[in-house]
Image: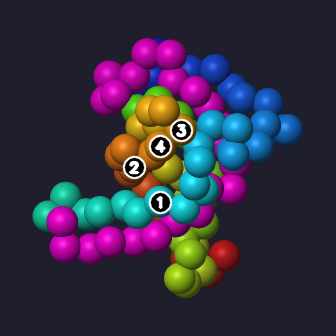
Amino acid sequence: MSEYESRLLPEALSPTELVDDLEFTEVTDDGEVYTLYRIVRITEEFIDSRDNWSHLANVVRVRDPAIGVAHLLIRDRVIHEAKVTVYREDA
């Protein structure tokens, strides 16, 4: 059984249909490191997430090359929380 119940979103769906600003900042748990990311595509909407995430997105780091996946909490078209897992540092 998967960790989250979700539904895939259409590839043609523009991220701007779900959020006002495609760029967001992830802050480390200790609040010392701020990293700016840009959403490339929002791939899934969570129906039932135990961690209160609402969406899953493909992202790129803005200041230096890296690609990853972000768990996002989106409410009223604003990203309130984010947790990014970076998969490639040389994107």
Identify the residue shown where x is 54% and y is 71%.
61
Q: Nearer the viewer, residue 47 or 90?
A: 47
Residue stretch rendered in magenta on the structure:
31-52
Magenta region's main secondary structure? strand
Q: Does label 4 or label 1 sit earlier along the sequence?
A: 1
Measuring from the top left, give residue 86's x and y in whole percent.
Answer: 49, 63
Position of residue 19 relative to residue 4, above or below, is below
Q: Does label 3 or label 2 sit earlier along the sequence?
A: 3
Going by the numbered disc 2, the residue's amino acid type is Ala
CA separation in Å, label 3 and label 4: 4 Å
Identify the residue shown where x is 63% and y is 37%.
18
Position of residue 22 relative to residue 31, above or below, is above
Q: Which mark is residue 77?
A: 3
- Disc 1 and disc 2 in contact, CB within 8 angstroms: yes
**Mark 1 or mark 3: which is in front?**
3
- Disc 3 and disc 4 in contact, CB within 8 angstroms: yes
Which residue is under mark 4?
A: 78
CA separation in Å, label 4 and label 2: 11 Å
CA separation in Å, label 1 and label 2: 8 Å
Asked whether 36 falls inside the magenta stretch, the response is yes
Measuring from the top left, give residue 69's x and y in whole percent.
Answer: 54, 52
Element assignment for label 3 = loop
Measuring from the top left, give residue 5's x and y in whole percent.
Answer: 50, 17
- Disc 4 and disc 2 in contact, CB within 8 angstroms: no
**Mark 1 or mark 2: which is in front?**
1
Would you say 30 lies left or right of 69 here? left
Asked whether 47 falls inside the magenta stretch, the response is yes
Going by the numbered disc 3, the residue's amino acid type is Arg
Which residue is under mark 1?
A: 24
Which residue is under mark 2?
A: 82
